[in-house]
Amino acid sequence: MHYLNIKQLHEVFISHFDNDHAGGLPDIEAAREQWQFRQPVITARQQCQRGFIRHWQGLTIEALWPLPGNTIDDNNHSCVLRIGAGKDWVLIAADIERSAEYALLYADILSPVTVLIAPHHGSKTSSGRMFVKTVDPQHVVFTTARHNRWNFPAPQVMRRYRQQGSQMHNTAVSGYLRFTFGATTGVHLTSAEKMLSRWYHPGSQSRVWPDS
């Protein structure tokens, strides 16, 4: 956020409280005096459940999962968000696994999207064949770390998206990704591979080294 010169946060969505999804929250909380918050943090156990919908600057933000009243904080009950407008939609599938995918399919609330953040980082326990076919993403992003111990994304998962015709992106290779949607220009993609500077968050012990 410092690198992108972002100085204002309107909302923060936490899918669930596994460290790889919520580990940066203390840094955001510590920056409250520098950044302006217009809404409180939304957590998986509070508003981020099916039925939540918000219209913001021309976008629709909608929670598809978990069901209302959920109090379980685990992968399969993590918050699934659909965000977009017009013909371009992004589905952020958090860490849901096959049973949650089936529940969404049964509810008949999934539809094709422009960008999918792959469920559970591309784990073999997610991205079932019918889920992939129904969501039919133009782009699918596997949010993974280089040399991750789980070997995400799984080969069989990549094969399903490849057969669906989706363009696949792995953050372990590309680093930071930005998708820009234009009414006439289509989808434009920018990655950290194009950023020449090496940087890290002040006070953090972990450095980020974009591929060169």
Image (tube, rainbow, N blue to C red):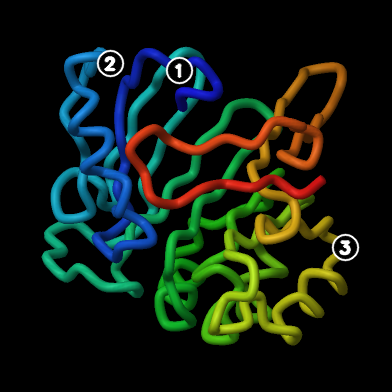
Select label 2 or label 3 by which is in front.
2
Q: Are marks 2 and 1 in contact (CB under 8 Å)?
A: yes
Residue 158, image x and y in percent? 76, 75
Q: Nearer the viewer, residue 79 or 62?
A: 79
Amino acid type indicated by mark 1: Ile
Q: Nearer the viewer, residue 202 or 61?
A: 202
Q: Which residue is mark 2?
A: 35
Residue 124, image x and y in percent? 59, 86
Residue 4, image x and y in percent? 55, 21
Q: Which mark is residue 121?
A: none
Is 189 situated above or below 131? above
**Helix, strand or loop under label 3:** loop
Is 57 situated above or below 197? above
Q: Which residue is mark 1?
A: 6
Q: Which residue is mark 3?
A: 165
**Mark 2 Cα-neighbour bin, 10 Å: few <14, some 14–19, many ≥20:** some
Disc on the earlier residue, 3 or 1: 1
Q: Is residue 205 left or right of residue 148?
A: left
Residue 189, image x and y in percent? 78, 35
Amino acid type indicated by mark 3: Gly
* Residue found at x 39% / y 13%: 7
**Mark 1 Cα-neighbour bin, 10 Å: few <14, some 14–19, many ≥20:** few
Q: Is residue 136 left or right of residue 11?
A: right
The span from disc 2 to disc 3 (Cα, nearest Å) is: 40 Å
* Residue found at x 23% / y 54%: 44
Q: Tell me where residue 168 sits by quadrant.
A: bottom right
Is 130 situated above or below 116? below
Amino acid type indicated by mark 2: Trp
**Helix, strand or loop under label 2:** loop
The span from disc 2 to disc 1 (Cα, nearest Å) is: 9 Å
The span from disc 3 to disc 1 (Cα, nearest Å) is: 34 Å
